[in-house]
Amino acid sequence: MTDTQDIVVSQEKFDEMIKELEHLKTVRRTEIAKNLEYARSLGDLSENAEYQEARDLQAATEERIKKLEDLVKTTKIITDGKKKSEISFGSKVSIRKGDSPELHEYTIVGSEEADMRVKKLSHVSPLGSALMGKKKGDVFSFETPSGKQTYTIEKVA
């Protein structure tokens, strides 16, 4: 990979990547081969939309397989071995913005598995990197496009 930054994921995410890779290599490649064979049987390939669509799908699938293979080779699996009191990979944190009564809860993860829809925050995001190494009760600030934000860490698990 050309990215010099280490890619870190949980064991759970690593297992998901392996499962997806195996599915693509076995089931999906077979499906695409059948689609290509069927599309070829329809005749003139230069004006065959089914054939072109199958070729595009094949290219996208092979690209995804290559990406997953590279990720599996270079990814570091993080373990929850650090002190629970200090925020690190896998930590579940509750933070409060300024004087707001509202708590925001996140799990700190690697960038490959970050997903704000399920409150998984990347350790390299502005908020995630500001949280790393902090402890319950710490007040911290970081810069955002809308200005400096200040938070208090309410809970670390």
Image (cartoon, grey):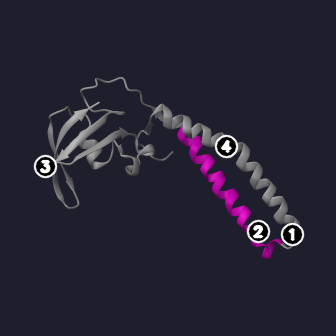
Residue 27, percent from left and from top? 73, 45
Q: Amino acid at mark 2?
A: Glu
Pointers 1 and 2 in contact (CB under 8 A)? yes
**Residue, far left:** 99
Q: Residue at left 24%, top 26%?
A: 85
At label 4, counting other C-alpha atoms closer than 10 Å, the crowd grade (few under 14, some 14-19, many 20 or more) is: few
Helix, strand or loop for disc 3: loop
Label placed on residue 42? 1
Q: Earlier in the sequence, mark 3 or mark 1?
A: 1
Picture quarter with the C terminus: top left
Q: Specify the farthest residue to the front.
A: 101
Measured Cα–Cα span from mark 4 to mark 1: 28 Å
| Contact between labelled residues 4 and 2, with CB atoms less than 8 Å apart | no
**Residue 77 belongs to magenta span:** no
Which comes before the other along the chain, label 4 or label 1?
4
In the depicted structure, whether residue 38 falls above or below residue 107: below
The residue beneath circle 2 is: 50
The kind of residue on which mark 4 rests is: His
Identify the secondary structure beneath mark 2: helix
Residue type for callout 1:
Leu
C-alpha gap between disc 3 and disc 4: 46 Å
What segment is highlighted magenta in the picture?
Answer: 45-72
Label 1 or label 2, whichever comes before in sequence order: 1
Which of the two labelled residues, at mark 3 and mark 2, occupies the earlier sequence position? 2
Which of these two is toward me, 4 or 43?
43
Which residue matches tag 4? Answer: 23
Q: Is residue 71 magenta?
A: yes
**Disc 3/disc 1 C-alpha distance (Å):** 65 Å
Q: Say whether marks 3 and 4 touch (CB < 8 Å).
A: no
Amino acid at circle 3: Gly
